[in-house]
Amino acid sequence: MSVYAIGDVQGCYDDLMALLDHIHFNEQFDRLWFAGDLVNRGPKNLQTVRFIKSLGEKAVTVLGNHDLHLLAMAAGCRIPKSTDTFQDILDAKDADEIFEWMRQRPVLHHDSRLGFTLIHAGLVPQWDLALAQSCARELEEALHGPNYKEFFQEMYGNEPAVWSDSLAGYERLRFIVNCLTRMRFCDMNGHMDMKETGPPGSQPEPYLPWFQVPNRASRDMKIICGHWSTLSYYAADGIYALDTGCVWGRGLTALKLDTIPKRITIPCSV
């Protein structure tokens, strides 16, 4: 059995199929990990989600910010953006089934046998594995619970921008969402800059890429993430960033996990 982690697909179904063909994916034996943002901005969102959903336990998917945006729209808590391309899912006959499946996805996955942790965006420097898992469970409970629509109403915003154990209620959940699904840069104290989206080096002082903060509590972890297309592929200090910008016509990347990590990237057609 082989295990492959795959970067942001964002509705690029044909490119996902090409990548799986390239790695000779065997649905009977192999397993796939998806780093979030299955949907949006690409051309075939419904086909993408239906396929990944059909894999059942053969695929692990964590939610990204675009996935949460779709769920918030489906719940009537968000209006569409001009760049959204997932109307095909909203109009689908099995839309409710798809949304229920998506809401049940985790926001963090840890495999103790392989030694990898899968998230979409990042971890603030105060969070070690145990705290990250605990915070992820809090968010997952809100997504899975009966009051999820109320949560989506409160999910958006850039504050609070720094972690505190004393955060509570929707402020705490909003911080967890922003950390796990939106963050790129933070300062030495974990204060997040949610506005900068460029590559490392484009940010103002005193911000750093979240994984370059010295002595972060997660420094001994092996973390797989996506989200940051301007970073592209990155492999250093236990971080494997896999968003190589497929939706922008650059590449879709898989990382083979069950051996020495091996990168496979194919060019994309979008």
Image (cartoon, grey):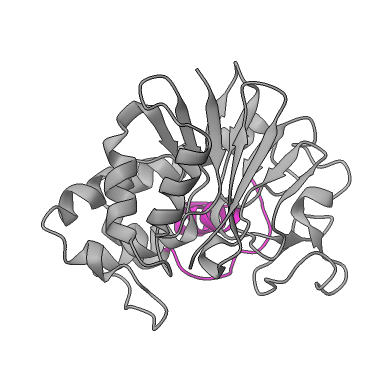
Is 14 left, or right, of 54 in this rendering?
A: right
Comparing 81 with 243, the one in front is 243
Q: Residue at x 72, y 60 (%)?
A: 231
Comparing 234 with 1, the one in front is 1
Comparing 155 with 219, the one in front is 219
Comparing 76 with 261, the one in front is 261
Residue 73 lies, in percent from the top left, at: 29, 68
Residue 201 lies, in percent from the top left, at: 85, 68
Q: Is residue 156 magenta?
A: yes
Q: Residue furthest left?
A: 93
Report which quarter residue 115 is drawn in.
top right
Residue 137 lies, in percent from the top left, at: 46, 37
Q: Residue at x 80, y 55 (%)?
A: 189
Number of numbered tags placed on the structure image: 0
Q: Is residue 105 visible?
A: yes
Q: Is residue 69 magenta?
A: no
Report which quarter residue 71 is drawn in.
bottom left
Report which quarter residue 160 is drawn in.
bottom right
Is 102 left, or right, of 203 in this rendering?
A: left
Residue 79 lies, in percent from the top left, at: 32, 78
Highlighted magenta segment, given as a residue range: 155-179
Q: Residue at x 28, y 54 (%)?
A: 47
Is 237 left, or right, of 260 in this rendering?
A: right
Say if 15 sits above or below 153 in the image: above
Q: Is residue 146 visible?
A: no
Q: Residue at x 64, y 60 (%)?
A: 228
